[in-house]
Image (cartoon, helix red, strand yellow):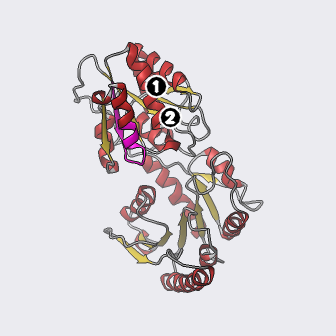
Amino acid sequence: MKKKDVRLLYITNPESIHARRWINAFANRGYDVHVLSPVPWEEDRVSTHVLPLYPVGAKNLWSRSMRGMKNVSSARKTIRKLSPHITHLHGLFTVAGPDLMFTVFRRNSLVVSTWGSDVVFPPGVREPLLSQAIKKFIFRQAAAVLATSEYQSLVTQQYCPKGLKVMTTPFGVDLKLFRRDEGIVKPPGVVTLGFVKRLEENYGPHILIEAFELVERSHKNVRLLMLGEGSMRKALEERLKQMGLLDKVVFTGCLENHRVPEFLNRMDIFVMPTFSETFGVAAVEAQAMELPVVASDIEGVKEIVIHNRTGLLFQKGNSEALARCLIDLIENPEKRVSMGAEGRRIVSAQYDWERNVDQVEKIYLNLMG
């Protein structure tokens, strides 16, 4: 069977860069790609069918139930009409109600991908029993379950029936796009630290600002580049202003993914002070750019950042420990170079995007027989 005759249906929200990259990867390979989406989305070579599986704005349980039943009926009719060879559910973020589980009930060749925050919860937060039950039901319908890291696979496995092994399929990087540009001229004598994530408490931008103040006391040549937007930006800028360091920090705001390498090229050290992460794609991108990574010593990150080989790990939330790691790398440029080279080597071997797509494609073809 030719690729153009193989129909793939993705049930996901294409507003996510993660979903878009997977969808476009298979559309670019010539497959007949369709998306069941809660929002309108236009993309070449992709057919989008708009249907919100979770009825936003329902005022009460009765309204919620009626809208949910209507959506499930429409979704199943759409799926029957499309008759996809593979149905791939990307993310489990709409399990507050039964819509999703009834939509995928008894779907042949169903692939389910977890994204991380849909199965991993912050310390002290317990997942509702209904949510657990719905996820377990969905996984019982699946022919294959995928996760992006070994840690995420381990957590996801707890929802799966016996005999169904979760497969790790990394969310890699485009090595042609994410590569060091040797032609970039950096300010002489300046060491630039970098951060790429939403400016939210869970990702630790405030920890980085605290560490930056400690580092700057003894290393006046340090600068900080903050990529991302979020609710903490104003407070972070105010804190830097109080420290007298605002002129040494640049906030870029939100950037499209294709522009990230441009700014990574301006960095010397990448910093990831997150409190929780199931797969540190930002660290993978930084390592592809031959940057040493200083990151929190947490699950989901330490399988990517190898301590003393591709970067340094510190106790999460400890700004003093982070500052010590940064000073170590600032004062040892040869260590930065060797860690950066090793990071690129490992990413090339394990997180090459095209190889990761090959891996998922092979899963699809095996399910089709």
Q: Please, is residue 84 above or below residue 326 in the view? A: below
Q: Is residue 174 visible?
A: yes
Q: Is residue 354 magenta?
A: no
Q: Is residue 284 left or right of residue 161?
A: left
Q: Please, is residue 228 above or below residue 339 in the view? A: below
- Residue 211 bears which disc, if any? 1
Magenta segment, which residues?
223-237
Of the 4 image quadrants, the one containing the C terminus is: bottom right
Q: Quadrant of residue 287?
A: top left
Identify which residue is drawn at 41% across, 13% down: 331
Q: Please, is residue 271 above or below residue 39 in the view? A: above
The mark total stands at 2
Q: Nearer the viewer, mark 2 or mark 1?
A: 1
Q: Position of residue 277 (x, y in %)?
A: 56, 44
Q: Position of residue 217 (x, y in %)?
A: 39, 16
Query: Which of the two residues, 132 or 41, is positioned nearer the viewer here?
Result: 132
Q: Are marks 2 and 1 in contact (CB under 8 Å)?
A: yes
**Residue at mark 2:** 273
Identify which residue is drawn at 39% across, 61% down: 24
Q: Is residue 230 magenta?
A: yes
